[in-house]
Image: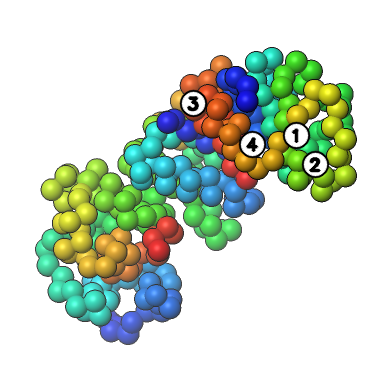
Amino acid sequence: MVSNAMPQRNNEGFLEDAQTWTEGVATAIAAEDDVDLTEKHWEIIKFLRSFYKEHEMSPPSNRLFVKAVKEALGEDKGNSIYLMQLFPGTPAKTACRIAGLPRPTNCL
Amino acid sequence: MTTLIMIDQPPYGAWTGREALDMAFSLAAFDQSASLLFTGPGVNWLRQTQHAGGIEQKSVEKNLAAAPIFGMDAILADRAACIAYGLDEHSLIEGVTLVDADADLLTDYDHTAFAG
Amino acid sequence: MTDIQTLHILNKSPDHPRAARCVEMMSAEDGLLLTGNGVLLLARGNLLPGASKVFALIPDVEARGLGDLSGNVSSVDFAEMVTLSLQAQRVISW
């Protein structure tokens, strides 16, 4: 059975438990930011999910988010303009929220 | 400007080590040359197969593995402390360089700061 | 102020293992700046590194009632502490 209920979130909209994330949850959270998820978004979201699985942390700041994407996917995607276009606001925060990860520790 | 951050406290008991890791990551974020040096009981950060779920914490081993991705220079460990805590190349996490943490080593860095 | 290669800043009390490490690691050309509980080292004169230049942050010294500094210890205020840190080639914060 698939539940459409939104899992528990904190006051900034981040999931309390990264395990409760599904693609449906991502789509719903993205919609709150008026973001329509495309293949480009999913590539970053998938990267963040695997980063979290491997390191048990979100990239701690926006700069380190950009660095980590650059390391994994190259300079075309690992730059702040590209990531800002996909994830408006503070890209690390927005992307982590959609990917169901905890809030980056140093993103004000 | 090169910075060496020393961690001489064991993992999990207190937050000082994590704060040090945050500091190191932040320096790397701004492309400042930064390395970590683990000494004394601090070398226990570097032991393989830590499972911290039971004490509801994240594994520092996995956190540390992100250091090269973020552009940190090196993860160093004091050789004598590793021997004292039974850590060798088989039980240490990958990417750790063994050094002698003495006054000579510190002359390579403009700034050395202990965590906590 | 003075030519210091390596300035050690110690804010741990004399019984903290790092205080002993710090003194042990110092060479004669190094400077030692005591701040916070580090100034308690002044009350344990025998532990002070004999050959090195020693500075102590005066508000921390006075707060602990250790106002009378002995001959080879210089007092510094906050501004002088900053100058001292900037002039040293290397700084080690214990």
Label 1 SS: strand
Label 2 SS: helix
Q: Nearer the viewer, mark 3 or mark 2?
A: 2
Q: Nearer the viewer, mark 4 or mark 2?
A: 4
Q: Nearer the viewer, mark 1 or mark 3?
A: 1
Question: Dividing the picture into quarters, in which one does residue A82 lie?
Answer: bottom left
Q: Position of residue A70 (x, y in %)?
A: 22, 46
Chain letter of the residue beneath label 4 in the structure image:
C
What's the image's color scheme?
rainbow
Residue, disc 4: C80
Residue, disc 2: C61
Figure label count: 4
- State yes or no: discs 3 and 4 in contact (Cβ < 8 Å): no
- State yes or no: discs 1 and 3 in contact (Cβ < 8 Å): no
Q: Quadrant of the C terminus of chain A?
A: bottom left
Label 4 SS: helix
Mark 4 closeness class: few <14, some 14–19, many ≥20 residues within 10 Å: few
Q: Amino acid at mark 2?
A: Val
Residue, disc 3: B109
Mark 1 closeness class: few <14, some 14–19, many ≥20 residues within 10 Å: some
Q: Nearer the viewer, mark 1 or mark 2?
A: 1
Chain letter of the residue beneath label 2 in the structure image:
C
Residue, disc 1: C75
Chain letter of the residue beneath label 3 in the structure image:
B
CA gap, disc 4 and disc 2: 15 Å
